[in-house]
Amino acid sequence: MGDTLEFNEIYHESKGSWNDGRLRFSKQNVVYKSSKTGKVDNIPAAELSVATWRRVCLGHGIKLATSSGHVYKYDGFRDTDYERISEFFKANYKVELTEKDMCVKGWNWGTAKFSGPLLSFDVNDSSVFEIPLASVSQCATGKNEVTLEFHQNDDSEVSLMEVRFYVPPGPADEGADPVEAFAQNVRSKADVIQATGDAVCVFKELQCLTPRGRYDILIYPAFLHLHGKTFDYKIPYTTVLRLFLLPSKDQRQMFFVISLDPPIKQGQTRYHFLILHFSKEEELKLTLNMSEEEVEKRYEGKLSKNMSGSLYEMVSRVMKALVNRKITVPGNFQGNTPGAQCITCSYKAQSGLLYPLERGFIYVHKPPVHLRFEEISSVNFARGTTTTRSFDFEVETKQGNQFTFSSIEREEYGKLFDFVNAKKLHIKNRGFKEKAKNNEYSDSDDDQHDAYLERMKAEGKIREEGDGSNDSDEETDESFNPGEESDVAEEYDSNASESDSGSGGDGSGDEGKKKPAKKAKVVKEKRERKPRKGKKQKDTNAPKRPMSSYMLWLNSSRERIKSENPGISITEISKKAGEMWKQIGKEDKEEWDGKAEEAKKTYEKAMKEYRESGGGSSTPAKKESKKEDKKRKSGGGEKEKEQGGNDSFKSREFISSEESSSDGERKKAKKAKKAKGTPQSRDKESEEEEGEAMTTPPSSEEDSD
């Protein structure tokens, strides 16, 4: 057997909520770390006194009791784990792991036993249930009755509000009241905060960002009391998870952050973080309300009776000594601003500061967010949505939650990328970001890679190619070549005036004196695009396409999902199914992949038979008819080309000087008629000549030009 035993997905109950984590047994200690909060329970092996193996709602559980009176319960073990754990305990802890069954009779009368921090209700020496007295918030007594009220946990779906015990009157012993004795045993271990005695010290009018306002902070040996004008909060030191001391970006202010679990409540609002705001210039002389000997004995040199210094130093020093937790400060990260150990950004439309720490990120202040590296699955650097001079930093946790810190100046990119890379966090777009990092975020927007723009360009190119193939009968546009004559001359161009003079004269002038007109480009009339073909009708007799392995699994599991989640909507069914599909094991997925492959083979066989029977669009008869249609169309087009027929025309501004023999003979005959006719007839004929020039199709020589 090895030196350690490790178990994953072991659950620890905390005020009605199950939190999973990892449990490790070693020769020196027992360590449990919560996946949700990161809180660590460390039990030295020398203090273990009792170990009990029980069957509970989550399989099997283990209950550990220490010589100091603490009790720890962990559930989620398998039945086969008993032998391994029992042998390990005997070999390393010299403690026997005993099996004990719970009472399931359902009786509501029995014996109440107080053992350390637990109240056990037993029937015939078998435990029915146990109540951790630390979860009791209030204990009230009545006639032969004791009422226990409990702290509420927001993470639990169902919460136990109170329990009432009926205590029958005792024997004729007038000196002892069994109800009061029961209540005293509860109060001695319950988490009932009572301000007894004087405070160790008092800090007046401290500025608090969450909850917002100014509060007097009274430091008691067991809890922290925030006294404001409107609200009061009492915070036990046992609910403090972490302490942070963070410098502001301007180096003139400090934030002192206290992480709480469970959070303090005000109505429906929950405050998981207590944030105090200080100025570095504030000084304070502090005197503790204790004797020097008592201070030295209780705090072992961490505090002294008389202290002086900056206000934030005094508060953090006192809190560290009383809570007995380390203060986390920013590590080696340096932002773009000299001396700044944070990054200015926005989270949920609120501007704040993001601090990269040695073991996580923390954002202050509205709302405060703390992300540990061990709960982060991946990070992503994304282009800013409003401007190219900023980027977004996206963090995705293993629980599927995503946090987006936006509007970060791109000058901070290099430092943040190096920090994330050094911490070995998974970066989704690593390849692109390393390339962009080498460019050092050039000021030119053209140098920046825009994935969305590139995708739009690719889709546009594909669309253009598709349009070109559909409209192959249309004429293609001529490309623009600098230096050549323009295809179209405007009315104010010299070409336009010359063409006007050439075509709009009275025709009586000498033909030899007429200036040769420049060759005009043929402007072809664009045909109207053919209407698109109607949507192809589906053949109802054709075989249906096979479904994927996921769709096959979804069809078989849809009813089960509905039954397990009554009232679930259609969209929620899809989301739930996607989550369940991700959690399916590899063997199960291979089974569904095999079913999908069988369905595919069946479809291919059916499709082959369907086509052989004459169905589908690819039958030989239809192929022959399509070929004949194409030949007929191509033959008709060639005939039209031979006849020179097209829809082009000549504008009156551009008349070609290179005329075919047929056009020349026609015009000479008309000019001879003009010489014989009257002026009115000549004018009329000139107008007809112009109209003919507008409608006469160009000759083959002009078309070739």
Image (tube, rainbow, N blue to C red):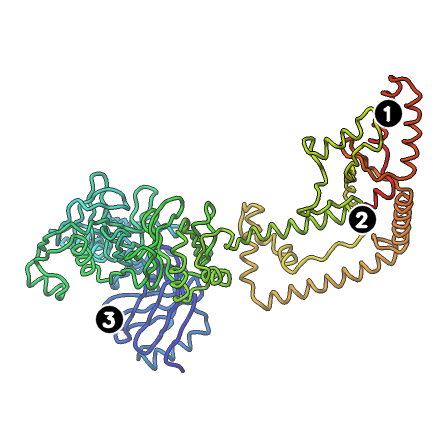
Three-letter amino acid code of the residue under disc 2: Asp
Quadrant including the N terminus: bottom left
Image point (93%, 34%), residue name: 665
User: Which residue is label 3 attached to?
Assistant: 67
Residue 562 at x, y = what percent? 57, 50
Quadrant of res 355: bottom left
User: Which residue is label 2 attached to?
Assistant: 539
Q: Gap between marks 1 and 3, in whole Å? A: 121 Å
Compare residues 450 and 646 and report the one nearer the observer: 646
Question: Marks 3 and 1: in contact by CB < 8 Å?
Answer: no
Q: Earlier in the sequence, mark 1 or mark 3?
A: 3
User: Which residue is label 1 attached to?
Assistant: 688
How many numbered discs?
3
Q: Earlier in the sequence, mark 2 or mark 3?
A: 3
- Mark 2 is surrounded, within 10 Å at the Cα level, by few (under 14), some (14 to 19) or many (20 or more) other residues, namely few
Quadrant of res 530: top right
From the viewer's perspective, is 698 left or right of 357?
A: right
Three-letter amino acid code of the residue under disc 3: Ser
Compare residues 670 and 26 and report the one nearer the observer: 670
